[in-house]
Image (tube, rainbow, N blue to C red):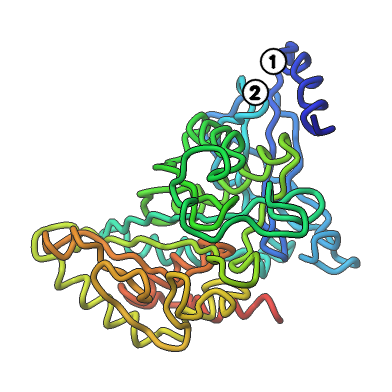
C-alpha cells in the first residue's frame, strides 16, 4: 500500500467533523504551463450564485504569471461545483486570472473565448471533448508496464476487460464518480489503444461551459490520482515508438447542423476549417507534431483532410451523420494537452465569424510577450 493510500485512509476519520457552519471553497486556476493550481478559502456560508463569491489573489511570480515586483494576480470566480473530496456544502471554484491593471492575465484565454461564445448564442453551439490521458508511476514508468520493458503490442487494450488488458480501473471509476457528484457533464469513459491510457468524454456542453467543465474534470482527475499515487500525463506522445498518442478530439455542432439538411452546413464549416488549418494547428497543443504523423489513427499536421468514418483524417464525419444528413463533426487534430478555451474559441471564430477585438491566434501569442 502506498503512502498516499495510507494517508487517505487516515484522513477519512476527519472528513465528517462538524465545520461549524463554515464552507471550504477550493479556488482553482490555470498557470503559465497549462497546469492547474489551487488554494482553499473559508467562507461563512454556501454561496447562492457565483456573484456571492469573493475575489482572491495569489503570488503570480511563483507560477510564472507575473514578475516578482508586481506579483499579485487576481482570481475572479466564474463557476463553482460541489466538492467531491470534502463533500457537504464545500465547493470547488473555477476562476479567471486578472492583472491589477484590470486586464486579463496573458495566460487567461477564457475571457476572449467567452466574448466569442456570447456573440453567437443564437447558433446554440454544442461541443463534446474526448480527453485522452496516460498514467505513470512515481518512477516515471507507464503505470503497470514491465520495468525496463514493454507489454504486448497494441491490440487487446482498447475498451479491454480483464487483468493484463486494462490497468488502474479504480482510478478511472473514482474520477467518473467525482465528476458525476459535482455535476460535470461527463458522458462516458473507455480504455484506450495504449495500455494505461484512458479517455473520458465531457459534453455536450454549450459555448464557454465546455472549457469550464473540461478544466474542472481535469482538476478532479489529478486530485483522484493523488489518492492512488498515480501521475497523470496529458502529453500528446507520452511514449515514443509504435504506440498511439493522446488527443482531445473536439466534436462540434451548431443548431443548423442538427436539423435535416444540416450536412450542407457541416460541409460549409469544413471548407472554412480547411482554409485556416495552420492557424488551428498553432492552438491545438504543444508537441502535437509528435502525434500528428499520419500514423496511429492521426492525419498529417501539414495538410487538412476530411472523410466519413475516417480516423486518419483531420476531421471525421461519423457514418451515422452521413447517412442521416445532419448532426456534428469531429475535429481529430487537437492534442490531449490543449487549452479548451483556445480550441473552442477558434472553432467558433472560424465557422461562425470573427468578433471585433478578439483574435484567438493573437490571444495565444500574448503568452510569449
Check disc 2 and report the residue beneath it.
45
Q: Is residue 110 above or below residue 169?
A: below
Q: Are marks 1 and 2 in contact (CB under 8 Å)?
A: yes
Relative image position of residue 315 (x, y in whole percent): 34, 73
Q: Is residue 186 left or right of residue 95?
A: left
Q: Nearer the viewer, residue 107 or 74?
A: 107
Q: Which mark is residue 353?
A: none
Q: Is residue 304 left or right of residue 270?
A: right
Q: Alpha-carbon distance for marks 1 and 2?
A: 7 Å
Residue at (43% x, 56% y) in the render: 129
Q: Earlier in the sequence, mark 1 or mark 2?
A: 1
Q: Nearer the viewer, residue 82 or 202?
A: 202
The answer to which image quadrant residue 311 occupies is bottom left
Relative image position of residue 271 (x, y in whole percent): 27, 82
Asked whether residue 7 appears in the rendered view, the answer is yes
Label 1 packing within 10 angstroms: few (<14), some (14-19), many (20+): few
Q: Is residue 168 left or right of residue 13?
A: left
Relative image position of residue 41 (x, y in whole percent): 75, 35
Check disc 1 and report the residue beneath it.
21
Q: Is residue 127 above or below residue 161?
A: below
Asked whether residue 256 appears in the rendered view, the answer is no
Residue at (64% x, 71% y) in the render: 240
The N terminus sits in image quarter? top right
Task: Say what secondary structure mark 2 lies in.
Answer: loop
Furthest-front residue in this view: 152
The answer to which image quadrant residue 265 occupies is bottom left
Relative image position of residue 93 (x, y in whole percent): 62, 40
Amino acid at each position: 500500500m502506498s503512502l498516499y493510500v495510507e494517508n487517505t485512509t487516515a484522513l477519512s476519520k476527519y472528513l465528517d467533523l462538524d465545520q461549524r457552519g463554515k464552507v471550504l471553497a477550493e479556488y482553482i486556476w490555470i498557470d503559465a504551463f497549462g497546469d492547474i493550481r489551487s488554494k482553499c478559502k473559508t467562507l461563512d456560508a454556501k454561496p447562492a450564485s457565483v456573484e456571492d463569491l469573493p475575489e482572491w489573489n495569489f503570488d503570480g511570480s511563483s507560477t510564472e504569471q507575473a514578475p516578482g515586483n508586481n506579483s499579485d494576480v487576481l482570481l475572479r470566480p466564474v463557476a463553482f461545483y460541489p466538492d467531491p473530496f470534502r463533500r457537504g456544502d464545500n465547493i470547488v471554484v473555477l476562476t479567471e486570472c486578472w492583472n491589477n491593471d484590470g486586464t486579463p492575465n496573458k495566460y487567461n484565454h477564457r475571457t476572449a473565448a467567452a466574448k466569442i461564445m456570447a456573440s453567437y448564442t443564437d447558433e446554440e453551439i454544442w461541443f463534446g471533448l474526448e480527453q485522452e490521458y496516460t498514467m505513470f508511476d512515481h518512477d516515471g514508468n507507464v503505470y503497470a508496464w514491465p520495468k525496463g520493458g514493454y507489454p504486448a503490442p497494441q491490440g487487446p487494450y482498447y475498451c479491454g476487460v480483464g487483468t493484463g488488458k486494462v490497468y488502474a480501473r479504480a482510478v478511472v471509476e473514482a474520477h467518473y464518480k467525482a465528476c458525476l457528484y459535482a455535476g460535470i457533464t461527463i458522458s462516458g469513459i473507455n480504455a484506450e489503444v495504449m495500455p494505461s491510457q484512458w479517455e473520458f468524454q465531457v459534453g455536450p456542453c454549450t459555448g464557454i461551459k465546455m472549457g469550464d467543465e473540461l478544466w474542472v474534470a481535469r482538476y478532479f482527475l489529478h486530485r483522484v490520482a493523488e489518492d492512488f499515487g498515480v501521475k497523470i500525463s496529458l502529453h500528446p506522445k507520452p511514449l515514443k515508438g509504435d504506440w498511439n498518442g493522446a488527443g482531445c478530439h473536439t466534436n462540434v455542432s451548431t443548431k443548423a447542423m442538427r436539423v435535416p439538411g444540416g450536412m450542407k452546413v457541416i460541409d460549409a464549416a469544413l471548407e472554412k476549417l480547411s482554409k485556416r488549418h495552420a492557424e488551428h494547428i498553432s492552438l491545438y497543443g504543444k508537441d502535437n507534431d509528435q502525434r500528428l504523423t499520419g500514423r496511429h489513427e492521426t492525419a498529417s499536421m501539414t495538410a487538412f483532410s476530411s472523410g466519413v468514418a475516417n480516423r486518419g483524417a483531420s476531421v471525421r464525419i461519423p457514418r451515422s451523420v452521413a447517412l442521416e444528413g445532419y448532426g456534428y463533426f469531429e475535429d481529430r487534430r487537437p492534442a490531449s494537452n490543449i487549452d479548451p478555451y483556445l480550441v473552442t474559441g477558434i472553432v467558433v471564430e472560424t465557422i461562425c465569424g470573427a468578433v471585433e477585438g478578439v483574435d484567438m491566434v493573437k490571444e495565444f501569442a500574448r503568452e510569449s510577450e
